[in-house]
Amino acid sequence: MTSDDSIAAADCRAVLRKVTLRLLPFMFLLYIMSYLDRINVSFAGLQMNQELGFNEGVFGFGAGVFFLGYFLFGVPSNLMVAKVGASRWISAIMVVWGIISVAMALVKDAQSFYLLRFFLGVAEAGFFPGMILYLTYWFPKRERGLAVAKFMSAIPVAGILGGIVSSQLLAMHGLYGLAGWKWLFIITGAPSVVLGLVVSLYLTDRPEHAKWLTESEKSTLLKTLSEDRLSETPVGDKTENINVFTNKTVWLFASIYFCLTLGMYGFQLWLPQIIHGFGGISDSQTALLSAIPAVFQALGMVLIAWNSDRVSERPWHVAVATVIAATGLMISSWSHDPVLSLCALSLAAFGIWGTVGPFWSLPTTYLAPGAAAAGIALINSVGNLGGFAGPFIVGQIKESTHNFAYALAAMAASLLLAGILTVGAFRTPAK
């Protein structure tokens, strides 16, 4: 490397640090609210199910029906991000989903529960794939895995905050005549409305529009991104003009993500009730204990993504993470000791969320920029049907067997299948 190359590399690292500090903390905060508003039902269910007479089947369907709306509107919503810009579209959908989340406090029966959860999924559909697409505008692929993991570490933080905050909100039961679960929806939904209004002022759509970068910094970043795209080796069907609806690579990614999300949301949306099943603990204590596996979610996401970026390898990192997750789920299904079960659930959380950074680095490598918007959205939308299947399957198994053991085993099998498919199809390391 010449001295000029060294200077250019140093300049690029400096610009990327500036971009990271400007964008990722804010995106992280937005995703906390997005994820909290989709999982707050898991904590609310501790009281809501009893008050409204919901059995495991009703709760499982209602928790999962979010993802039917998410599936139907994922692709068109993400195309809107590409068309009108992230700042305007993300702002609009955040305000809408915040209002719907608050309105969950008005649920009176199964029908209203299903309806509001469905429309919450519709509103949130464009957020995550939009943010994954948005990161491709700012980060070269060698930096993208860790950037995705940092952004998605909002998931475990939302789990931690959800557990801590929910323990307090559920204890507000009866304040001003409202049940604790209603306070939970109101207080966790309102910040999304406020942040949605801030998005339009803070988020910059593209590097060339960034007033917070100097002209030299813009030039360095745009040159790096351009060279990054030109240097990409065509892999699989990597063309600009693929039809994502008929492309086998896109559908394979979607199938893998379906298996991952089946385990992910089956675990996440039932976790408080799995822990409550240990016995002898209150609703507030259950919510607090649910924060412990969330800490391991964060560790898994960051550590596995960091190592994946370090060695420039993705498929085997996904596969190993699924083995770790399945091991934790199976130990928990066999154990009758609450402490061991909680430790095993924490191990499962480490593995499940350890898959996300390496996994989401793969589609952005295998899909060209022109196909990325629709491809990522389709993968995310179809894959997230696992988010419907997981909670529904867990609810049905729990209702039939009156315990969670077989449900945990089913999630473990789904995760292992995802790992096998990933290694089988994508052995070429991401460069």
Image (cartoon, grey):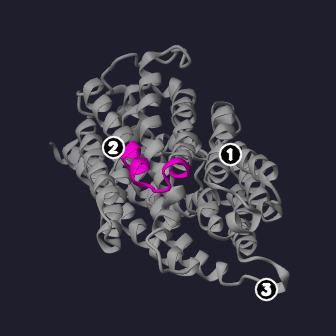
Q: Residue at x 45, y 63 (%)?
A: 156
Mark-to-mark CA distance, 2 and 1: 25 Å
Q: Position of residue 164 (x, y in %)?
A: 53, 78
Can see residue 30? no
Relative to 61, residue 49 above or below: below
N-term-proximal mark, 3 vs 1? 1
Q: What's drawn in magenta, residue-wise?
A: 398-412
Mark-to-mark CA distance, 2 and 3: 45 Å
Say which mark, if any, is on residue 54: none
Which image quarter holds the C terminus?
A: top left
Q: Residues within 10 Å of mark 1 (few under 14, many from 20)?
A: many
Q: Circle 1 sits on which residue? A: 121
Amino acid at dot 1: Gly
Q: Position of residue 59 (x, y in %)?
A: 65, 53
Q: Circle 3 sits on which residue? A: 175
The residue nearer to you, when weighing 137 against 158, is 158
Q: Main secondary structure of the magenta part?
A: helix
The residue nearer to you, when weighing 5 against 75, is 75
Q: Nearer the viewer, mark 3 or mark 1?
A: 3
Which quarter of the figure has residue 178?
A: bottom right
N-term-proximal mark, 2 vs 1? 1
Q: Circle 2 sits on which residue? A: 358
Q: Is residue 328 left or right of residue 113?
A: left
Q: Nearer the viewer, mark 2 or mark 1?
A: 1
Mark-to-mark CA distance, 3 and 1: 29 Å
The residue nearer to you, when weighing 295 against 342, is 342
